[in-house]
Image (cartoon, rainbow, N blue to C red):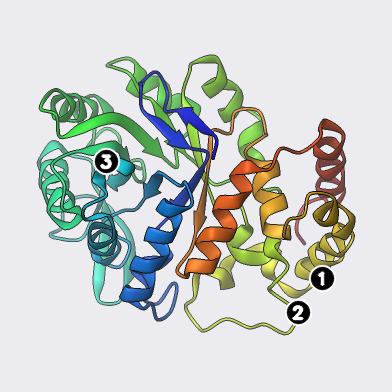
Amino acid sequence: MRTRKIGTTDIEASVIALGAWAIGGGTWWGESDDDESVRAIQASIDAGVSLIDTAPVYGWGRSEEVVGQAIKGRRDKVVLATKCGLWWHDEQGPLFFELEGYTVRRCLRPGTIRREVEDSLRRLGTDYIDLYQTHWQSPEPENDPVAETMECLLQLKEEGKIRAIGASNIEVAQIEEYRKLGVLDAIQPRYSMLDRQIEEALLPFCRENDISSLVYSPLEQGLLTGKITMDQTFSPGEYRNNLPWLQPLNRQKVLKMLEGWSGLTGKYDCTLAQLVIAWTVEQPGITFALCGARKEEHSIENAAAGDIVLDVEDLVNLRGEVESLGEPL
């Protein structure tokens, strides 16, 4: 498994990371078997994946707890990333969404961050977090100043509770606000072959400033594995119902494109998912690809993509094909 450094730190992590959002289960992802998830996490580690990303809001702490169970006795083999800023314990912060009886607000105030980091440390069963990320940025910065947020994060770093600071779902102007006060080593944006918006400004800025990117949804919630057919439907409330590329007309276009890649999967002796992941981590500015897995076989399949190096000609041709799809209808 290839590794890369997180930002300007000396923290080395695998290019393929395990994203633990679905492990939290619930309305967004349906039933999740914790024992099976533990086995999937451990299989990832055994296959060379060292970077694991989770968050408190994934299952209201459940994802972090499951990750904590899985890494018990293996902490030295893991680079742990989690988040703060989605708050449901009181009425601090503007409303973000309501789900499963919880009212979630965006809040990046020092008091809430302090509580969140302690809760995460307890659930994960560790005394430090390698990469601590703000999950969503405040829509009311005048009431939730980045300066106060960053000052708190820098204090946590000095105290040894976190090793590096990151920010998810962020824009260039917001990154610049963080950087006025200290080092921001990583960002976590959405990115896939089908959703390349961050290539315009965000990724070039990060490349120029030694900021790593951990991209989520590189398989477009399973669509780019080729395993989601035209017949598949999703339960009411499931997250994938909201994705444009999974709507029937768009899905049909993507599946037709994927059918044409059998020659490449044969050439590299890989699955479609592995081909897509391998392409993703070779794109300029992409440091790590976060791939979800709740089953051992999926963990092993994803991890193997970290050993595939695509020829330049194939990288270019694949980009040409996805760009020819245009925007989703």
Q: Is residue 181 shown above or below 128?
A: above
Q: Position of residue 257 (x, y in %)?
A: 85, 60
Label 1: which residue? 252
- For residue 320, above or below residue 264: above
Who is closer to the viewer here, 39 or 284?
Answer: 39
Which dot marks residue 76?
3
Callout 3–callout 2 Cβ contact below 8 Å: no
Q: Are marks 1 and 2 in contact (CB under 8 Å)?
A: yes
Q: How many neighbours does mark 2 have within 10 angstroms: few (below 14), some (14-19), or many (20 or more)?
A: few
Q: Which residue is mark 2?
A: 230
Q: Quadrant of the N terminus?
A: top right
Nearest to the observer: residue 163 or residue 4? 4
Rounded to the nearest angstrom, the CA distance separating label 1 from label 3 is: 44 Å
Disc 1 residue crowd, few under 14, some 14–19, many 20+, Cα 10 Å: some
Q: Which residue shows up at 38% across the image and 49% down it?
A: 53
- Residue 178: percent from left, percent from top: 33, 23
Q: Quadrant of residue 301?
A: bottom right
Residue 105, how many percent across, how many down?
26, 55
Q: Nearer the viewer, mark 3 or mark 2?
A: 3
Asked which quadrant contains residue 104, the reply is: bottom left
Residue kind at label 2, given as amino acid type? Met
